Image (spheres, rainbow, N blue to C red):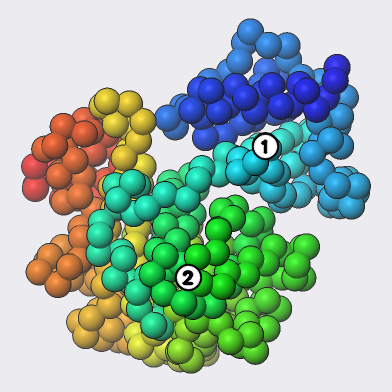
């Protein structure tokens, strides 16, 4: 097998089928994920261990391949043709190589992503901490990329992204954009964040907050005049705040509550719902940190945040269930999928 040609043929299939992910595993048929569903390419031969090894050696550098063999897993990015990027993860299961690649689409606008225009107001803030949250594969990176792109289009700013790996690559317009990849351009998120304080940065995008040190430094950056954008794998705004606070030792939790109450500007939670007409469309929740929310964070009453969001429409807040109902009424999604993706189905039933 000519490994590079075989690999690129699989990438062409992924692109042609408008898929999001490509799964390659020794002993299995290749598979692509299309509109959230996994489809096996049964017309192709099952891949062997030698095939996976050969493909990995063609898409990774010698240093990356050695890291994979030594550590048995690796995050990486791959550029196929000009402007087509993928992010990948290689790992080992039962002694066999597995590679999963996600196609990184071109940067889209908030409108093209069917996201609320109010997100633009957060991108235009001079400072604060803004989080985009949701399960894996729900479009968080695309949303943050749209916000960075808007800043780049509108004003001269120094934007720093810290990612593992770099996903979207931006064409510099009005802003200076520096993109640092963990493991290549910096040792880790924490080191890159600490260095940012000496780099005259206005906006910091953190690909993912993986530990307490990164969270603490991100909050400090937001307090000291930076706009900080990041993601967490949580389901709701209230759960996000609890996750952040609970990641700190008990003796530090009161302090982080005070810091979050003053620095957090909003939390945007999103889900990509199967569309009746094909493809997927986002449903979302938007929490805006106002006086009521800030008091609940300080006083450890985060369980009351959902109620504030539900009743905060006039302040610009968006409740997930109302977002789902709106999509049902527009004929975009089915009632069944609205219930399947709701974080509070009982409340959704009451509203329908």
Note whether 105 is above or below 185 in the view shown: above
| Residue 82, image x, y percentages | 65, 41
Residues 5 and 63: in front is: 5
Front residue of this view, candidates 341 and 146? 146
Residue 102 vertical position relative to residue 185 in the rendered view, above or below: above
**Visible residue check, residue 32:** no
**Label whose residue precedes the other's in the sequence (2 or 1):** 1
| Disc assigned to residue 174 | 2
Res 81 label: 1
Disc 1: CA contacts within 10 A as few (<14), some (14-19) or many (>=20): few
At horizontal 83% and vertical 24% (from top left) the residue drawn is 3
Give the tally of numbered discs: 2
Mark 2 or mark 1, whichever is nearer to me: 2
Indicate which disc residue 89 carries.
none
Occupied quadrant, residue 329? top left
Mark 2, Cα crowd under 10 Å, few <14 / some 14-19 / many 20+, is: some
Residue at screen point 46% across, 89% down: 225
> Which quarter of the image is occupied by the N terminus?
top right
């Amino acid at each position: 097998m000519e490994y590079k040609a075989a690999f690129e043929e699989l990438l062409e299939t992924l692109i042609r089928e408008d898929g999001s992910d490509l799964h390659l595993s020794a002993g299995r048929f290749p598979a692509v994920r299309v509109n959230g569903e996994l489809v096996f390419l049964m017309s192709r031969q099952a891949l062997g261990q030698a095939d996976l090894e050969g493909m990995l050696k063609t898409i990774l550098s010698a240093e990356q391949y050695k890291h994979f063999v030594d550590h048995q897993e690796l995050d990486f990015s791959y550029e196929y043709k000009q402007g087509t990027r993928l992010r990948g993860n290689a790992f080992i299961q039962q002694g066999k190589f597995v590679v999963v690649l996600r196609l990184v689409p071109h940067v889209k606008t908030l409108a093209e992503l069917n996201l609320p225009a109010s997100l633009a107001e957060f991108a235009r803030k001079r400072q604060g901490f803004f989080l985009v949250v949701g399960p894996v594969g729900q479009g968080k990176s695309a949303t943050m990329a749209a916000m960075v792109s808007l800043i780049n289009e509108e004003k001269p700013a120094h934007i720093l992204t810290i990612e593992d790996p770099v996903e979207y690559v931006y064409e510099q317009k009005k802003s200076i954009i520096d993109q640092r990849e963990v493991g290549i351009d910096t040792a880790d998120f924490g080191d890159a964040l600490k260095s940012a304080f000496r780099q005259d940065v206005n906006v910091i995008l953190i690909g993912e907050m993986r530990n307490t040190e990164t969270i603490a430094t991100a909050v400090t950056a937001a307090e000291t005049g930076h706009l900080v954008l990041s993601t967490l794998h949580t389901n709701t705004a209230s759960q996000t705040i609890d996750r952040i606070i609970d990641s700190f030792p008990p003796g530090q939790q009161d302090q982080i509550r005070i810091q979050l109450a003053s620095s957090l500007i909003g939390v945007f939670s999103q889900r990509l719902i199967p569309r009746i007409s094909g493809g997927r469309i986002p449903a979302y929740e938007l929490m805006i940190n106002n006086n009521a929310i800030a008091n609940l964070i300080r006083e450890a009453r985060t369980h009351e945040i959902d109620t504030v969001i539900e009743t905060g429409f006039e302040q610009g807040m968006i409740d997930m269930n109302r977002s789902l109902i709106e999509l049902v009424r527009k004929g975009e999604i089915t009632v069944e999928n609205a219930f399947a993706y709701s974080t509070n189905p009982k409340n959704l039933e009451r509203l329908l």
